Amino acid sequence: MSKRRKWPAEEKLRIVLAGMQPGVEVSDLCRQEGINPTMFYYWKKKVLSSAKQVFDE
């Protein structure tokens, strides 16, 4: 039985920003980081949805 890894917010943001760079293959990035692409897209959705709040202030 393996423990689930707890990803710090800084690591999640780093991975999402890396995946949004031109020419980066998300599948390759996820393989390198050891995450499922579904998790990457979930994190990306959260980042983008919270970005609106920054500009609403």
Image: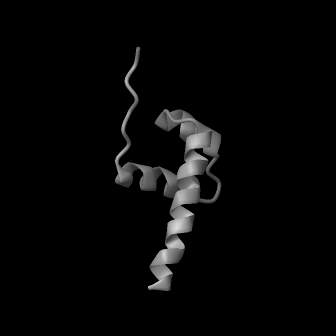
The answer to whether residue 5 is left or right of residue 38 is left
Is there any visible trace of residue 27 in the rendered image?
A: yes
Which residue occupies 53% across, 58% down?
46
Q: Position of residue 30 (x, y in %)?
A: 55, 39
57 versus 41 height, above or below: below
20 versus 39 height, above or below: below
Q: Position of residue 53 (x, y in %)?
A: 49, 76
In this view, the residue farthest toward the bottom is: 57
Q: Position of residue 14 (x, y in %)?
A: 43, 54
Which residue occupies 53% across, 52% down?
43
Quarter containing the N terminus: top left
33 versus 52 height, above or below: above
Quarter containing the C terminus: bottom left
Q: Quadrant of residue 27?
A: top right
- Closer to the camera in the image, 57 or 29: 57
Which residue occupies 56% across, 66% down?
49
